[in-house]
């Protein structure tokens, strides 16, 4: 088997996390992987994904984007990102297509909270962001607020109110875009009654 130094170099070249087929391409097979796990060098993150344990404290954002490349950061995670909430989310809130497999979110780390949406609406409001130096796919402010209106019955009341107030006070808010999204997401009436009174 390769030396730990060489294996670490290979993991570093893959951002600290590798899939089974990538390990096989590097000539690290099942018995090698099990040996590395037993020695505490790597850990299994979820089925088919392995992480170098001392990969410079790999950011959870990097893990999320690697595990769920199709997901978009949303809801509480997006609210915290835009400073519409001061509560650090206990899980990563991710939106994926409703056709996406549900079992892949049953992992021990990092904690995730998936939301499922119509494929045609998945990328509505998609933008690029950065967390801990890692590029992420995240919904823009207007999509985030529309999603809060869609899920308001399930949201913590204080978090919801703070989000709405934060958006209203944001000098960069885009009301025409909010209206455009609200029509497509069928929350136009809620926009009028909840946000309209403040505008």
Image (tube, rainbow, N blue to C red):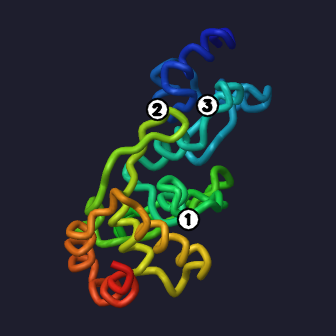
**Horizontally, is 79 left or right of 44 in the view?**
left
Residue plotted at (53% across, 38% down): 62
Residue 147 location (% of width, % of height): 40, 73
Mark number for residue 30? Answer: 3
Q: Which one is earlier in the sequence, the residue at label 3 or at label 1?
A: 3
Mark number for residue 155? Answer: none
Residue at which label 1 appears: 113
Viewer can see residue 31: no
Residue at which label 2 appears: 21
Q: How crowded is mark 1: few (under 14 residues within 10 Å), some or many (20 or more)?
A: some
User: What kind of element bears circle 3?
Assistant: helix
Residue plotted at (45% across, 69% down): 115
**Horizontally, is 137 left or right of 88 in the view?**
left
Foreground disc of the pair 3, 1: 1
Q: Which one is earlier in the sequence, the residue at label 3 or at label 2?
A: 2
Q: How crowded is mark 2: few (under 14 residues within 10 Å), some or many (20 or more)?
A: few
Residue 148 location (% of width, % of height): 44, 75
Indicate whether 175 appears above or below 66. Answer: below
The quadrant of the picture occupied by the N terminus is: top right
Q: Which of 78 and 26 is in front in this view?
A: 78
Q: Give the CA distance from mark 3 to mark 1.
A: 31 Å
Indicate whether 196 appears above or below 11. Answer: below
Residue 113 location (% of width, % of height): 55, 65
User: What kind of element bears circle 2?
Assistant: helix
**Horizontally, is 72 left or right of 49 in the view?**
left
């Amino acid at each position: 088997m390769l030396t730990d130094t060489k294996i670490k170099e290979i993991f570093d070249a893959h951002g600290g996390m590798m899939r089974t087929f990538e390990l096989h391409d590097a000539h690290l097979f099942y018995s090698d992987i099990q040996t590395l796990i037993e020695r505490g060098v790597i850990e299994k993150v979820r089925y088919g994904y392995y992480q170098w344990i001392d990969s410079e404290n790999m950011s959870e954002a990097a893990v999320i984007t690697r595990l769920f490349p199709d997901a978009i950061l949303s809801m509480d995670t997006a609210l915290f990102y835009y400073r519409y909430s001061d509560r650090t989310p206990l899980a990563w809130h991710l939106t994926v297509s409703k056709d996406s497999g549900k079992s892949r979110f049953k992992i021990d780390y990092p904690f995730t909270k998936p939301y499922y949406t119509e494929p045609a609406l998945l990328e509505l409001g998609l933008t690029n962001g950065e967390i801990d130096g890692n590029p992420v796919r995240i919904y823009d402010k207007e999509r985030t607020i529309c999603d809060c209106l869609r899920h308001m019955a399930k949201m913590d009341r204080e978090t919801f109110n703070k989000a709405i107030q934060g958006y209203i006070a944001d000098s960069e808010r885009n009301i025409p875009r909010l209206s455009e999204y609200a029509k497509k997401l069928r929350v136009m009436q809620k926009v009028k009654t909840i946000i309209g009174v403040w505008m």
